[in-house]
Amino acid sequence: MADLLDAWLKLGLDIDDFLSATPRLYMLVTRAAVAARHRADDGMIHGAWLGAILGRAKKIPALDSLLSRPADADDDPEMRAAEQRAEMAALREVMAAQGRTRSWSEWRES
């Protein structure tokens, strides 16, 4: 349990959320936090690399060619939808356990 808490805290997540997380929610949250950290790291590396390359370029490429984003090979819409449904189910479970559920009409009125 201490290793799980240690990993959770190293990702910069709140201890109260850890204490109320189900095993499934723990897995989803830590996986998402690690992916977010990898994306941030990749962004910094990409920025540094691009800055170094453009600093040596004789002709700067068009901005559109630099901003284009290739399709993500892992971006399967059905898989993403399934993951989102699982995340929402886990969130509903935690919210219900904490007594923090509201109906749609209560939500709109708040």
Image: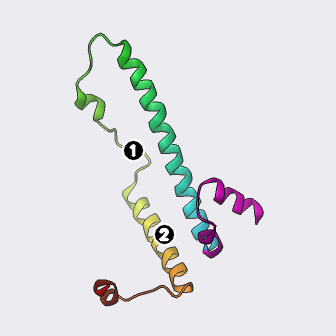
Q: Residue at x 54, y 55 (%)?
A: 33
In the image, what residue occupies the spot 55% across and 84% down? Answer: 98
Q: Disc 1 designates what residue?
A: 72
Task: List x then y, in percent, for residue 103.
Answer: 37, 89
SS at circle 2:
helix
The amino acid sitting under disc 1 is Asp
Q: Is residue 54 left or right of residue 28?
A: left
Q: Is residue 67 above or below residue 108?
A: above
SS assignment at label 1: loop
Q: Amino acid at mark 2?
A: Glu
Viewer-proximal residue among 71 and 20: 20
Q: Which residue is mark 2?
A: 87
Q: Which residues are magenta?
A: 1-20
Q: Say which label, 2 or 1, has the lower sequence index.
A: 1
Q: Judge from the rendering whether residue 14 lies leftward or rightward of residue 43; answer left or right.
A: right
Which residue appears at 50% of the width and 75% of the height? 91
Location of the C terminus (image quadrant): bottom left
Residue 62 on image: x %, y %: 22, 24
